[in-house]
Amino acid sequence: MKIVTCVAPVNIAVIKYWGKRDENLILPINDSISASLSTDIMCAKTTIMASPLLKENKFWLNGREQTFDSPRFSNCIKAIRARCDETLPQFNWKISICSENNFPTAAGLASSAAGYACLVHALAQLYEIKGEISDIARQGSGSACRSIYGGWVQWHKGDLPTGADSIATQIAPADHWPEMRIIVLVVNDCRKKYSSTSGMKTTTETSTLVKFRAESVVNQRAKAMKKAIEDKDYESFAEITMKDSNQMHAICLDTFPPCVYMNDTSHAIVNLVHSYNEYKKGQKVAYTFDAGPNACIYLLQSEVEQFISVVNHVFPKPADIDAVEYYRGLTLPNKQLDKKIVDDLNLTPHDTGVLKYIIYTKVGGGPQVLGDPSEHLLQDNGLPK
Ligand code: DP6
């Protein structure tokens, strides 16, 4: 019997992936760049057991049994097994997989990226595979290839039709820019959304702007972003991050029918950030939005106290929600209102409950193996604990 448990990070892109040139292999039309977030705060966790005693392959995700046949899932398993030494005993054993996210999927936060990175990393441990695996994680969900590494990561679009060169590499490790923090403003939203997969498919079929982006914008932007990260040049980093998020959502509107992911609260957050930056006479805070209304704010630790004070003023916490429920993750500095900046900015507060909760986190490492057997999500018989 062989059992392995891993955790893998969520990643948030600052240069966005939006559009594929191959739907099956999941090959993108442009490079993208992200940071992997601390697994102490948000992560996917996966246990895989291989045993001669197991009668069939089984898979549970967030407490629910799944089939083994979904194309993306089975592509990952096939691709990993193709790299395994077939003389290893576990190659011929059935497997049990149990996977969960430690953050609510309702938050709409890149759960498939962390999940597939975790699955592929755990499978690679199980089948003792050394070497590149980000191209395999990519076949689960494009953005998952970036969660195979910690710190700052670039996904190279690649040129080969096989996808062998469409891999992720690390630009800089997690401790390269230790002051960087991320605040996720989870927006209350009950609207049913279209997935990134279907949204970006319609985009590549119908948008003319997306061609301009892939051909004439992203290459230069990715270079400038890489340099901003390497030089820890926050102002350039912030400007490119916001512009690239805005361009992705402009392209979503250029899609026919349009994909609308940001809502009124998202736009109010954009306004708040620009007012804040104008007041500070520089880019001190940066927003970015994925395929949903939640805002991810990248900012330096020195800015957190004042920024959160403004957020609390504009989006008041409902009195009936406990602070421990509302403020998640790392401990936020003094949450009292900074009266001066709030008065100077003169922003009108929204009703309470517009934000569901706030997650405070930082850049973190890549997937990890958890050695302690108490961490396993499976019992010795291969069923979930
Ligand atoms: C908006 O990786 O979820 O988060 O490859 O179809 O699974 P598929 O899409 P997915 O797309 C993520 C898009 C994004 C931007 C990004 O993370 O770069």
Image: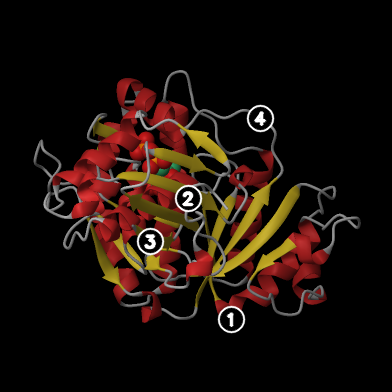
Q: Looking at this view, is 41 or 203 the one in front? A: 41
Q: Amino acid at mark 2?
A: Asn
Q: Which residue is mark 2?
A: 381
Q: Amino acid at mark 1?
A: Ser
Q: Ligand 1: give its quadrant.
A: top left
Residue 80 visible (yes or no): yes
Q: Which mark is residue 191?
A: 4
C-alpha separation, residue under disc 2 versus residue under disc 1: 50 Å
Q: Which mark is residue 302?
A: 1
Q: Which residue is mark 3?
A: 4
Question: Quick one: label 1 or label 4, which is nearer the N terminus?
Answer: 4
| Nearer the camera: disc 2 or disc 1 | 2
Q: Residue at x 23, y 55 (%)?
A: 127
Q: Residue at x 29, y 55 (%)?
A: 221
| Mark 4 surroundings within 10 Å by alpha-carbon count, few (fewer than 14), some (14 through 19), many (20 or more) | few
Q: Residue at x 49, y 41 (%)?
A: 60
